[in-house]
Image (cartoon, rainbow, N blue to C red):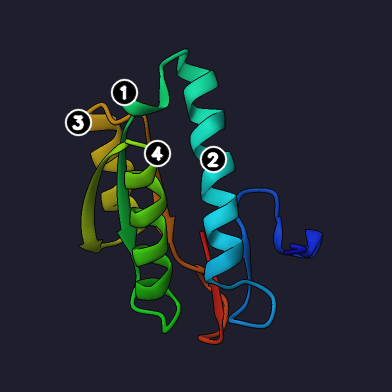
Amino acid sequence: MEIKPEIFKSYDVRGIYPAEINEEAVGLIIQTYVKLVSEKFKKPIKDLNLVLGRDNRESSEPFSLVIKEVLLEYGVNVTDLGLISINDLYFAVGNYRFDGGIMITASHNPPEYGGL
């Protein structure tokens, strides 16, 4: 699958769902994310502790399912907080000392967008 470089922004990944970003693209992106977090913390992937949250967009639940599947396949310990705000995710990462977090949202963009 070819992922369009335009979906990669300065602080997130987002695009129109499912034309520009879809479950397959998210799965590939998360595989790379896991490897980067592992390298950053110099921890084996199976020892990573990540937290996951999402907003209420049409794409968010399907993305959440794919992300959990990929993380579990890699042996990552994942805590799914479900429907939360980005501030709650930031708090969880910092306060509970997760190695990282993934927020499924396209933030302020129109509803047809999805992202991480």
Q: Which is nearer the N-term, disc 4 or disc 1?
A: 1
Q: Residue at x 45, y 78 (%)?
A: 59
List the residue tagged with mark 1.
Answer: 47
Quadrant (top left/top right/bottom left/bottom right) for the N terminus: bottom right
List the residue tagged with mark 2.
Answer: 33
Under mark 3, the amino acid is: Tyr
Cα–Cα gap, marks 2 and 3: 20 Å
Q: Residue furthest front?
A: 73
Percent of width and height locating residue 72:
32, 45
Picture disc at residue 96: 3
Picture disc at residue 74: 4
Percent of width and height locating residue 107:
50, 68
Q: Residues within 10 Å of mark 4 (few under 14, many from 20)?
A: some
Q: Residues within 10 Å of mark 3 (few under 14, many from 20)?
A: few
Secondary element at tag 4: loop
Q: Give left or right: position of 111 versus 47.
A: right
Under mark 2, the amino acid is: Tyr
Task: Check if mark 4's residue and mark 2's residue have beta carbons within 8 Å.
Answer: no
Q: Residue at x 68, y 82 (%)?
A: 19
Q: Residues within 10 Å of mark 2 (few under 14, many from 20)?
A: some
Cα–Cα gap, marks 4 and 2: 12 Å
Q: Residue furthest top?
A: 42
Viewer-nearest of discs 4 and 1: 4
Secondary element at tag 2: helix
Quadrant of the image occupied by residue 17: bottom right
Viewer-nearest of discs 2 and 3: 2
Percent of width and height locating residue 21:
63, 71
Task: Check if mark 2's residue and mark 3's residue have beta carbons within 8 Å.
Answer: no
Quadrant of the image occupied by residue 45: top left
Percent of width and height locating residue 103:
40, 55
